[in-house]
Amino acid sequence: GNYVTDKKFCFNHLLQAAQLDSESCEAFTLLGRYYSQVAQDSERARKCFQRALANDDNAEEAGQWLCDELHRQGQYVLEESICAEAAENSATATWAWRRLGCCQIRQQNFTNAISSFYGALRASPEDSTTWEGLGASYQEMGMLTSAKKAYEKAISDSPKREYSLLQLARVEYTLASYDHAAELYTRALEVCEEVDQESNGACKSSALFGLAQANLALANKLSKDGAYAAAD
């Protein structure tokens, strides 16, 4: 409404707060969000988020918004550099370690990504997003047992993580555990049906395809083992 868009309200109050307390991480973060969402001024938004981070490396909201801005602009090197600096400055900056790991996955630097995700877990051992990233890194390196454990941990902390469910099912399928894969794809399908109400159905499509593969492989295995009735 007008209280957000009219500069004499939201903007002026945030600006005054930042001027009165130049060490306020929250004021600069909110000011950055105003520039990003309302004023559509990415340059000023970036400067505000950087100022918030300069005040506190653990400022997750400012860090995530800043990296999102850089990512949208294709400035991937700078995005990674900011995450690396914040992680180096603070062992407890979970957001920075986690985001750094994601940057390294994008570069297919999976060994370093694993190290970064463990850095995030040292600060936040129950963070399901980090466990998911760790699982993806292990999976890309072909370390399926480690990937399986990481995905299982992500799901135990957050049962509706569709990506972890789909990828754990894929790992189980690769390990020839077709019955477990089918169970996981079924669970993923239930979650995807909720998620895909507001998306393009890609999640549900992946779950259905995987479930069909797993059931076919299981039927073939049962037939080879002589369990014809179970295979029908």
Image (tube, rainbow, N blue to C red):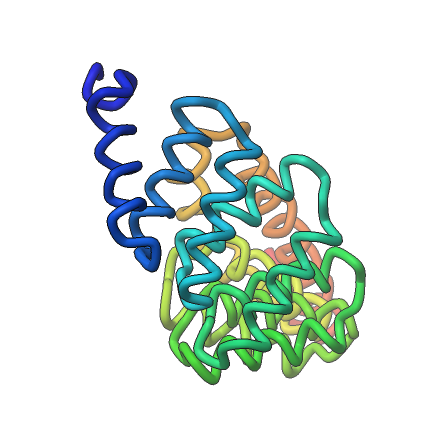
| Foreground pick, 93 / 220 | 93
Q: On screen, 161 above or below 49?
A: below
Q: Which residue is painted at 70% across and 52% down in the image?
A: 78
Quick check: 98 left or right of 193? right
Q: Quadrant of residue 24?
A: bottom left
Quarter occupied by the N terminus: top left
Quarter occupied by the C terminus: bottom right
Give x and y (percent) for residue 181: 58, 64
Q: Which residue is painted at 41% across and 63% down in the image?
A: 55
Q: On screen, 43 above or below 4?
A: below
| Foreground pick, 226 / 40 | 40
Give x and y (percent) for residue 220: 73, 62
Q: Which residue is painted at 44% across and 78% down in the image?
A: 92
Q: Tally the marks.
A: 0
Residue 228 can be seen, yes or no? no
| Foreground pick, 39 / 16 | 16
| Foreground pick, 128 / 36 | 36
Residue closest to the far front = 20
Quick check: 31 left or right of 232? left
Give x and y (percent) for residue 203: 55, 41
Q: Which residue is painted at 60% across and 63% down in the image?
A: 83
Q: Quadrant of residue 111?
A: bottom right
Give x and y (percent) for residue 196: 46, 34
Q: Quadrant of residue 89?
A: bottom right
Residue 62 can be seen, yes or no? yes
